[in-house]
Amino acid sequence: MTTDMKTPKLILNYQKYNDAKLDVKTQAIIGSLTGNANFPITSPSLIDFTDVASAFSSSLTAAASRARVAVSLKNDARETLLTSLRLLAMNIDSLAESNRSKLVSSGMDLAIEGDNTIGLAAPQEFIIADGKNPGEVKFMVKAVENAKSYIFEYTEEPLTLESSWISKGASTREYTFGNMTSGKRIYGRVVAIGTRGQEVTTNVLTRMVQ
């Protein structure tokens, strides 16, 4: 009698992740590997990986200006991070020796899942409100069961299919954007991210920046 058991492995390519989701994911991986007895030493090291992740996170902030040089530097930092993620996943795969629990403890995504995907409901009670200071806008949604993180996005008018969205990832259900232009109308939405990478997006709301 044979059993059809697939060997668990980590995904090696995070290219499908958008910038905000990639930022959130790498921070989650760093948190999972910090003090993790399963992987006391990795290649690249946790220190080196954290430096690469921090450089990418900083480049996202700079690229929000949409300046061509800043966007180009962000793209370079993204490719460096993706390469580092691939090397880290390959190393952890080797260290874990197909132990699923160890792989999951790394915070990285499994390429093969034997169980059913956990459901993720659409975020409810989405609100865009004024922040505490001029030029601040606060996004809020009701906490989503099984959501691991959230991505908050906005774009300025006019809203079109080609609109460029500014994204920021967070582990909490609220986020405040700052340094926005007063009197400018913005459109916003929130994406809930599940533990298996599922994504559910709210409807788009609009508000005038105070």
Image (cartoon, grey):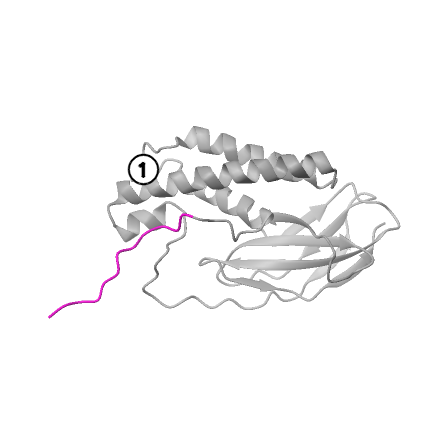
Which residue appears at 43% of the width and 66% of the height? 118
- Say which quarter of the image contains residue 190: bottom right
Q: Please, what is the dominant secondary structure of the magenta stretch? A: loop
Residue 151 position, x and y percent, is 61, 53
Q: Amino acid at mark 1?
A: Phe
Which residue appears at 71% of the width and 61% of the height? 127
Residue 155 position, x and y percent, is 75, 54
Q: Residue furthest right?
A: 183
Q: Is residue 131 left or right of residue 113?
A: right
- Give the total number of marks visible in the rendering: 1
Q: Can you say whether 207 is above or below 65 in the image?
A: below
Q: Is residue 88 left or right of residue 68?
A: left
> According to the image, label 1 marks what residue?
39
Q: Which residue is more in the foreground, 128 or 92?
A: 92
Q: Residues within 10 Å of mark 1 (few under 14, many from 20)?
A: some
Q: Can you say whether 188 is above or below 106 in the image?
A: below
Q: Secondary structure at mark 1?
A: loop
Q: Is residue 47 left or right of residue 62?
A: left
Report if residue 30 is visible in the image.
no
Residue 24 position, x and y percent, is 54, 46
Report if residue 57 is visible in the image.
yes
Which residue appears at 79% of the width and 60% of the height? 159
- Say which quarter of the image contains residue 49: top left
From which residue to which does the magenta span run?
1-12
Magenta-span inclusion, residue 89: no
Magenta-span inclusion, residue 2: yes
